[in-house]
Image (cartoon, grey):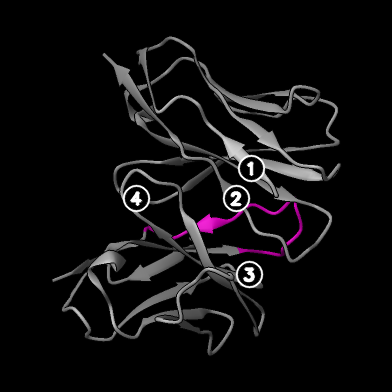
Amino acid sequence: DAMVIQNPRYQVTQFGKPVTLSCSQTLNHNVMYWYQQKSSQAPKLLFHYYDKDFNNEADTPDNFQSRRPNTSFCFLDIRSPGLGDAAMYLCATSRDRGMTYEQYFGPGTRLTVT
Amino acid sequence: AQKITQTQPGMFVQEKEAVTLDCTYDTSDPSYGLFWYKQPSSGEMIFLIYQGSYDQQNATEGRYSLNFQKARKSANLVISASQLGDSAMYFCAMREGRDNNNDMRFGAGTRLTVKP
């Protein structure tokens, strides 16, 4: 089945130690998104790629970076994780960016910072 | 700026009964899309149903229907014949249409618990 895959499902990192979360998709969608979701809150968009074009949200900290080497893969890099970065990180894809296109989400990576 | 409001932090429903989850939105764009997602405890967001601002009829998908009242700017989700597996967080979301570089914005969510 076509899907959005996130690895790992659970990640533990130390304060200040760089960490990379990965997302892959078999849907061949043009758009890939990264969201941060803290407990009992709505997902917060960090950034998205439309094909190779990177679109950063204005309030996304510089500590968060992303790479999309090809259509299928997208990575979230946290350069120096702080305790406040502990959250669920959700990857999503969309065929396009128009208002009619739903987003398909992966299962998420739960990040713990010790 | 667009805004999504879900006023019910938590809802309870008896198994096999229907439940309505409220969502209101605010936008000045005449073109927009409204979405509902389900998030079980496992974490994955599951797309349930879509309603376009110009759609004449309320959207339905199986046991899910959307009660779209455009003048009131509300898009309530109705789940009929609730099942235990419906227990989850439910998020209402919107995308505006005026600009293709638009983002999906989510409400705060409603936690639904289905009681046996």
Dominant SS in magenta: loop
Residue bearing mark 2: B105
In the displayed orientation, state which residue is furthest to the bottom.
Answer: A69
Q: Amino acid at mark 3?
A: His
**Helix or strand or loop: what does disc 1 sit on?**
strand
Q: Amino acid at mark 2?
A: Arg
Asked if marks 2 and 3 fall on the same chain, the answer is no
Residue bearing mark 4: B43
Chain label for disc 3: A
Q: Nearer the viewer, mark 4 or mark 1?
A: 1
Percent position (x, y) of residue A92?
Answer: 52, 62
Residue bearing mark 3: A29
| Between B3 and A105, the one nearer to me in the picture | B3
Q: Amino acid at mark 1?
A: Lys
Magenta stretch, residue numbers: A94-107
Residue depicted at x 64% and y 52%: A102
**Helix or strand or loop: what does disc 4 sit on?**
loop
**Helix or strand or loop: what does disc 2 sit on?**
strand
Check if mark 3's residue and mark 4's residue have beta carbons within 8 Å.
no
Residue depicted at x 48% and y 82%: A66
Check if mark 2's residue and mark 1's residue have beta carbons within 8 Å.
yes
**Helix or strand or loop: what does disc 3 sit on?**
loop
Q: CA distance from mark 2 to mark 1?
A: 7 Å
Residue depicted at x 53% and y 90%: A69
| Between B60 and B105, the one nearer to me in the picture | B105
Q: CA distance from mark 4 to mark 2?
A: 18 Å
Residue bearing mark 1: B3
Q: Quadrant of residue A28?
A: bottom right
Q: Is residue B93 visible?
A: yes
